[in-house]
Image (spheres, rainbow, N blue to C red):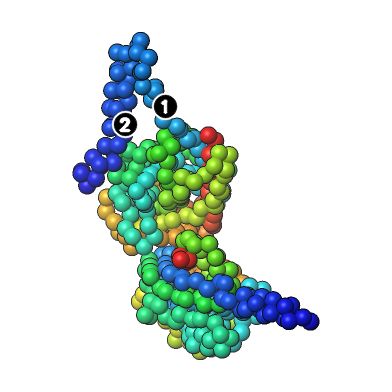
Amino acid sequence: MKWQQFKTSLPLSAMALSAGLILSACSDNDHDANMPEPPTPPVERSFTLTVTNLTANQPMSPLALLATSNGYHAWQSGEPASLALEQLAEGGDQSGYSAEMDGVNLVVSGAGILPPGASESLTLTQTEEATASLSLLTMLVNTNDAFSGLDEIDISQMAVDQTQSFYTPAYDAGTEANSELKGSIPGPADGGEGFNGSRDDVDRVHLHPGVIGQEDGLNDSVLMASHRFDNPVLKVTIQRTR
Amino acid sequence: MTLRKISASLILAGLVATPIGAAELTISVSNLTHGNHFTPVLIAAHDAQMHLFQAGEPATSALQKMAEGGDIADLAAMVDAANGVTQSNPAGGLMVPGQNVTGISLDSQAMTHMSLVAMILPTNDAFIGLDGWEIPTTPGTYTLNLNAYDAGTEANDEIINGGGMPGVPGIPAAPGGDGGNNASGVADTSPNDKVHIHPGILGDTDPAGGMSDLDSRVHRWLNPVARVTVTVK
């Protein structure tokens, strides 16, 4: 793991190093007619992600946009959630994701809670050669461990002004039972606990079965009818802007 | 008609008869649900006219057998009789929640469209469905999200009683061992007797009685319920 992290960070530091060398070589040879061509600045690509919360009463935790490569998966259906995903899906906490992770080049964070009906745009800018794919994550905060987003969307072939649009479903991290009990849900419906390291559910990511609520027969649920949701829960548009 | 014209039309006919849609497909099927099993899956490649099911149309008796009892033999025979290609039961039995079956090979030959069905347990007549997806000719990997359909042939009473034969009320089994018993039954007042999007199950939290033998905390789902990837070589 350590070695792989080193390997992925190597090209960037090597590039910075050689750029520095070339620049200093230039300053030493100001009057040399044969001075080498100045280094071409790295070509950058920018993408704007616009995310709309389509739910009735499920605020979304601050968006986490990951610029990824090397086939990085934020999750895979049928497989256990990573610790970073468990923290995000149970508590809306995205701090487990960082550019230090193997396959994650950059993390762009949303400004704050994305309320139902609201939209937010995030901008991702990176070098052309670093551009590969992206993932997006956010928690439905009035749930035990529901999240939504995108996993490993290829953006490397997008032309300027081209867009890709997605309607995303709600997933269940499978790390916390959907008890809907008082004290177990971090969102405003409850104000209860977020992340808890124990895993008392099926321990695999799957499509969320939906919440039940006390008015639909789950008598000890803190959730009400308006907290129910159906798919899709987010609309996401990716546009390459340059 | 001159000889030249005849030979030209023969060549054309030969070209048309060539299986231009022929493709080696590699398929994977994932069960995305929280707590539902799939009975043996049927994957079929067929022409544009054939359908295993169609939303808004009544279920055939072959579809009813699959949706109420998990029996895919009649559907497979129907496809085979029309020179289609089938892959029956690639998982070798039930697909448990979360299971992902990969590397399923299907040579679509001259067939241009693909369909896929399997019953969802425990339900009365719910099934996962892909209806006549046109097989792309461009190589690549294609991801398809499948919804849960209701065959419209049996009332969703949510009583587990072993009833899996066509026309017999009730649910054959809860393979996860998480079903209840002694339910009084859900009154299904749906007037839709055509194939339609399943309304989902109701369930309750009383395993020894109540209205339903299904558990609202285990057996509910939201679409999609299955994900299929198809790699065209």
Q: Quadrant of the N terminus of chain B?
A: bottom right
Could you tell me the amino acid type at mark 1? Answer: Pro
Label 1's element? loop
Furthest toward the front, the residue is B3
Q: Residues within 10 Å of mark 2 (few under 14, many from 20)?
A: few
Classify A163 as above or below B50: above
Q: Chain of mark 1?
A: A
Q: Chain of mark 2?
A: A
Give the image quarter of residue B121.
bottom left
The answer to which of A123 and A87 lies nearer the viewer is A123
Residue tagged 1: A41
Residue tagged 2: A15
Residue for point 36% across, 75% down: B176
Furthest toward the top, the residue is A31
Furthest toward the right, the residue is B1
Where does the image place residue B175, in percent across and percent down from the top left?
A: 38, 78
Could you tell me the amino acid type at mark 2? Answer: Met
Give the image quarter of residue B17.
bottom right
The answer to which of A77 and A239 lies nearer the viewer is A239
Q: Is residue B218 left or right of residue B149?
A: left
